[in-house]
Image: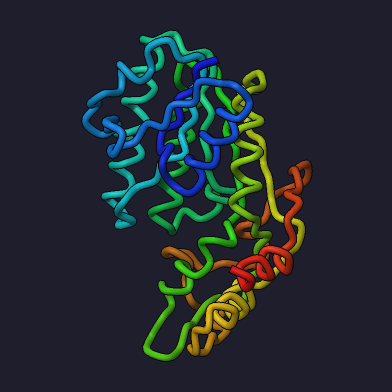
Amino acid sequence: MKIVVIGGTGLIGSNVVKRLANQGHEAVAAAPNTGVNTLTGEGLAAALDGAQVVVDVSNSPNFADDAVMSFFKTSTGNVLDAEAAAGVRHHVALSIVGADRLRDSGYMRAKVAQEEMIKDGHTPYTIVKATQFYEFVKAIAETGADGDTVRLTPAKLRPMAADDVAALVAEVALAEPVNGLVEVAGPEAIPLDELARQILKVDGDPRTVVADPGTAYFGAVLDDNSLTPDAGFRTAPTKFADWLAARAAR
């Protein structure tokens, strides 16, 4: 089966491509550095020719409110149009648990807009909504950095390993579309400031992480329920301590 992975050279996308290829499928990594630009449409029709499934794990290079909204609307619109023309049977997209609760965040508003476009499209779909990745916590910490101090909300998340995200996305790509959502979260609820504190320590980063409930997360103030899923979600297997130990070993 031919499966095109939009954003297929990134952290999640490259992992999904590898998993699908290892199972004998024709997994195509579609990204600007492979000649496919979903903003301009360059190379998109050729990449989707003969594809049965499209997996979209792409992300905006710019998180400014207007830029991220423009990226997801333009890219998603072009992909949906191209896959309809190509007769694609299943559209899989990666989104974020709790995005619809954080309308103060321009990034989250853009992800909700992307989800709505997919739901209104003509291709059967499955939207995988995941919690935050362990691998992105340090980048999140940088948003609260001020000299030797990092201020982050102590709101609890249920973070998960990127490898677990990729495994589920690949699994969903090979299944029938549900025309709905599949939510996945990590096995433990952990405060964001504590996640960052432990990762910085393992990385030898001397900065001090300070818990500040008023610190915004990409424009929105969080509580313990903001980015955690409702009942019925799937639980990713990798615990934070195990992921952290592997990071320390590397």
Q: Residue at x 69, y 51 (%)?
A: 185
Front residue of 161 and 214: 161
Question: Residue 246, located in which quarter of the rendered image?
Answer: bottom right
Q: Residue at x 41, y 41 (%)?
A: 9
Task: Give left or right: position of 184 versus 139.
Answer: right
Provide residue 25's location: percent of width, then percent of height. Answer: 56, 21
Vertical comparison of 98 with 45: above or below? below
Provide residue 80's location: percent of width, then percent of height. Answer: 39, 22
- Name the quadrant of the C terminus: bottom right
Provide residue 181's location: percent of width, then percent of height. Answer: 63, 33
Vertical comparison of 137 with 228: above or below? below
Q: Residue at x 44, y 8 (%)?
A: 87
- Name the quadrant of the N terminus: top right
Front residue of 21 and 77: 21
Provide residue 136's location: percent of width, then percent of height. Answer: 51, 61
Task: Give left or right: position of 240 versus 179.
Answer: right
